[in-house]
Image (spheres, grey):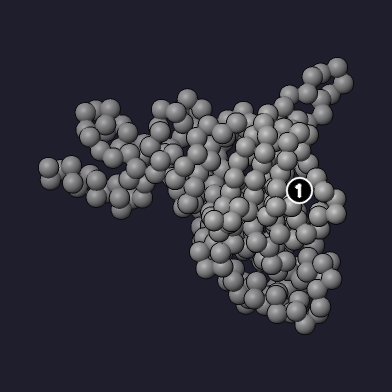
Amino acid sequence: MTTAIETKELTFSYPADEGDFSLPVFEKLNLTIEEGSFVAVLGHNGCGKSTLAKQLNAVLLPEGGKVFVYGMDTADEDQLLEIRRTVGMVFQNPDNQMVANVVEEDVAFAPENLGVEPAEIRRRVDEALKTVGMYEFRMHAPHLLSGGQKQRIAIAGVIAMRPKCIVLDEPTAMLDPHGREEVISTIERLNRESGITVVLITHHMTEACRADRVIVMQEGKILTDGSPKEVFSQVELLKSADLTVPATTALLYELNKAGCELPLDALSTEECAQALCAMLKA
């Protein structure tokens, strides 16, 4: 498989206040993300999730080590524009990414700044809005939309740049359950149908369950890394990092403590119900 993102011995720290020592966020972090994958990154506030997201399209640059985006070194200024075309960013607050008074103008903003021809911009805007299910709102004012709709418009603006990878930094943190589902369903569709590599920074376990791979970070290091079933089966390890597990796993874990023998990798409601039914029939 093709490598989309790679960090090699990545080291980074934020400048300290006068008289204080700077604390490293990462010390020799090594990570590889394959093209076309859907990766969720979990961890407490301060563990380095958002800093990692900003390293992936050169918003922040390594202090030591390297970050490569499809083989391009993020520290190479000559590659900066191409890196940011390749990796699109969606942030927590969609209002911070809205720059126009009409939805379609907002989506057109990035390709216009990339020098894309007007006819091609028109095609990209229409295609992006249809992809996120917001085409019928193309002439609406963004500020009148719901939080979930705004975030889908922000994603459409990134899609219009035709990136190979999208990094989303807690895009559902400010949304209600309906808005979260709108956004996560859109992300899944982009990954499955368009083959876009997705890196989702989140603190919602149910969102992480829908990824192909889950990376759990703690104090700038990778605590565990694997499929959702592999990661969330490690209940004790996650508890040691003050992280929760999906409600289904938590239920099965408590039942096992009471003497049952149930699989902790039954993540979905349906899988959990099947495991419980099988136990009752045994």
Q: Which residue lies most toward the right here?
A: 18
Q: Quadrant of the N terminus?
A: bottom right
Q: Which residue is mark 1?
A: 73
Residue 277 or residue 31, whichever sits in front: 31
* Label 1 crowd (10 A; few <14 / some 14-19 / many >=20): some
Residue shown at the point (32%, 33%) measured from the top left:
253
Q: Is residue 67 above or below residue 10?
A: below
Residue shown at the point (67%, 77%) measured from the top left:
126
Q: Is residue 61 above or below residue 159?
A: above
Where residue 249 sits, quadrant-wise, is: top left
Give residue 172's position: percent from left, percent from top.
59, 51
Give residue 164's position: percent from left, percent from top.
65, 61
Residue shown at the point (56%, 43%) measured from the top left:
41
Give residue 157's position: percent from left, percent from top.
71, 65
Residue 180 visible? The answer is no
Q: Which residue lies most toward the bottom here?
A: 119
Residue 82 or residue 8, whichever sits in front: 8
Residue 84 or residue 261, whichever sits in front: 84
Residue shown at the point (18%, 46%) measured from the top left:
278
In the rendered structure, the answer to whether residue 176 lies left or right of residue 10 reads left
Q: Amino acid at mark 1?
A: Asp
Q: Secondary structure at mark 1?
A: strand
Residue 73 visible? The answer is yes
Q: Is residue 135 above or below residue 84?
A: below
In the rendered structure, the answer to whether residue 115 lies left or right of residue 279 reads right
